[in-house]
Image: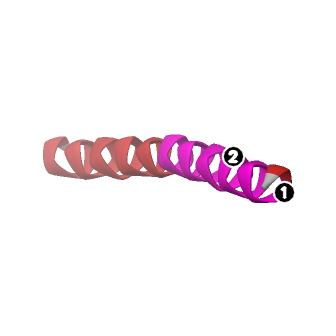
Amino acid sequence: MYGHFFVSFSQTHNFLHFKRYYYKITICVSVDEQEMEYS
């Protein structure tokens, strides 16, 4: 049971880390698109 809890906790941690990484990519992409529109 403890091992299952540890696995689910690490999965949640990885998911949150991936979400933060994904938001960074999305922001960078949207900024690039805005700069391309203005230039």
What's the CA distance linking mark 1 and mark 2?
Answer: 10 Å
- The image position of residue 30, as x and y in percent, is 28, 47
Q: Is residue 6 magenta?
A: yes
For badge 1, the amino acid type reads: Gly
Q: Residue at x 15, y 49 (%)?
A: 37
Q: Which mark is residue 34?
A: none
Please give the name of the residue rendered at 37% of the width and 50% of the height, measured from the top-left corner: 26
Magenta extent: 3-21
Callout 1 touching callout 2 (CB < 8 Å): no
Q: Which residue is mark 1?
A: 3
Numbered marks: total: 2
Q: Position of residue 35 (x, y in %)?
A: 27, 43
Earlier sequence position, callout 1 versus callout 2: 1
Residue 7 in percent (x, y) is at: 75, 58
Name of the residue lying farthest toward the right: 3
Secondary element type, mark 1: helix
Q: Horizontal and vertical percent for residue 19?
A: 48, 47
Q: Is residue 39 magenta?
A: no
| Secondary structure category for the residue under label 2 | helix
Query: Left of 24 or right of it: where is 39?
Result: left
Residue at the spot x=47%, y=52% of the render? 22
Q: Is residue 27 left or right of residue 35?
A: right
Q: Please give the label number shown on residue 9.
A: 2
Task: Name the foreground residue: 38 vs 7.
Answer: 7
Magenta stretch: helix, strand or loop mostly: helix
**Could you classify mark 1 by the number of other residues whose Cα lies within 10 Å: few (under 14), some (14-19), or many (20 or more)?**
few
- The quarter of the image holding the N terminus is bottom right
